[in-house]
Amino acid sequence: MTALVRPYRLAPGARVAVVAPSGPVSEERLEAGLDILRGWDLDPVVAPHVLDRHGELGYLAGTDADRAADLQNAWCDPSVAAVLCARGGYGVQRIVDLLDWDAMRAAGPKVFVGFSDPTVLHQAFATRLGLVTLYGPAAAGADFVKNTRTQEHLRATLFHPESVRTLRAAAGGGALVPGRARGVTLGGCLALLAADLGTPHAPASARGGLLVIEDVGEQAYRIDRMLTQLLRSGWLDGVAGIALGSWSGCGPYEKLRPVFVDRLGGLGVPVVEELGFGHCEGALTIPLGVAAELDADAGTLTLDEPALR
């Protein structure tokens, strides 16, 4: 894998668009998130359909066509420097094939932020646009509006990315499998990576990459099933190293750890656990598409260069 194009960092006064490509958005949390962004001297604009609800499918924030149009229009607006997802949930897989990727490529590089369900967009931005993206908090997410650590790490990544080139495992984290590895970061939510296999926008494999994975609300056997699918498909062949994030709502971690040892230990690559990204309190922002070094023994992921130019 090769490193991707890094967008430009944000400057005070930058216009950022908030879109809802997945599930319904809480208006109260959206307003709280917008206040935080304004406090950073950003100019947030809300896409027209962010607060919509799909009439028959209540788990979607509006129709597929409207959600896709919001995302594409925001990306192709030359006044917008960054596009932020309001939340995750479900729905990106329904719109990713509706986007005009040629038009979005012509719009040039800009910052994209989201996590969980937008994993599918991170993969598409990498394969279709060749662009570094930020696996970071949702603008209307509970953790973002309540947790200063999450806020400050995203803010530093957006404005001063050289200050957050090293991510460290949380207390109790470290080497599941010891060693060091170099590669280009990729990944996101495990369930979406498994679901995206074989689609036109997914990377052919994780070969040469540093895979970062996390999930929420999945039982141990389901995590086993998804990892097994990645293994059986050959998608993990040649992966250089793996960083495990949070597994909130997935049961006691001591019951998950044997699954990771069993499914990932045989790959013969370094694996670090509890790196502190994903669906957890104080979640860190992880750039995808950046060359980095994973040191499982030290519990660190260090980027070769800042995520943004």
Image (cartoon, rainbow, N blue to C red):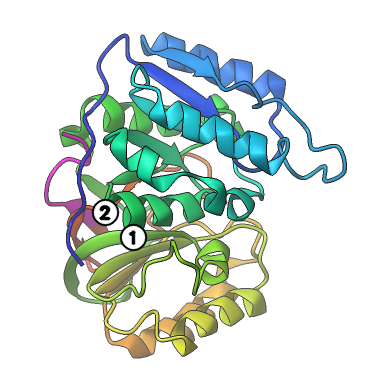
Earlier-in-chain disc, 1 versus 2:
1
Q: Which residue is mark 2?
A: 289
* Residue type (three-letter) at the residue carrying disc 1: Leu
Q: Quadrant of the C terminus?
A: top left
For the point 64% across and 27% down, the residue is 50
121 to the left or right of 222: left
Q: From mark 1 to mark 2, how far is it between C-alphas?
A: 6 Å
Q: Marks 1 and 2: CB-CB under 8 Å?
A: yes
User: Disc 1 on helix, strand or loop?
Assistant: strand
Relative to the observer, which residue lies in front, 257 or 49? 49
Seen in the picture, residue 144 relative to 13 is either above or below; the reply is below
Seen in the picture, residue 162 relative to 294 is either above or below; the reply is above
For the point 19% across and 53% down, the residue is 302
Q: Is residue 84 magenta?
A: no
Q: Quadrant of the N terminus?
A: bottom left
For the point 37% across and 67% down, the residue is 203
For the point 20% across and 46% down, the residue is 5
* Residue type (three-letter) at the residue carrying disc 2: Gly
* Residue 200 tag number: none
195 to the left or right of 15: right
* Residue segment shown in magenta: 301-309
Seen in the picture, residue 86 relative to 287 is either above or below; the reply is above
Q: Which residue is mark 1?
A: 186
Relative to the observer, which residue lies in front, 167 or 20? 20
By secondary structure, the bulk of the magenta-drawn segment is best described as loop
Q: Farthest residue to the right: give it.
A: 56
Total numbered badges shown on the rendered structure = 2
Residue 15, given in percent of the width and then of the height, sits at 38, 15
Circle 1 packing at 10 Å, graded few (<14), some (14-19), many (20+), is many
Regarding residue 276, the answer to whether it shows in the image is no
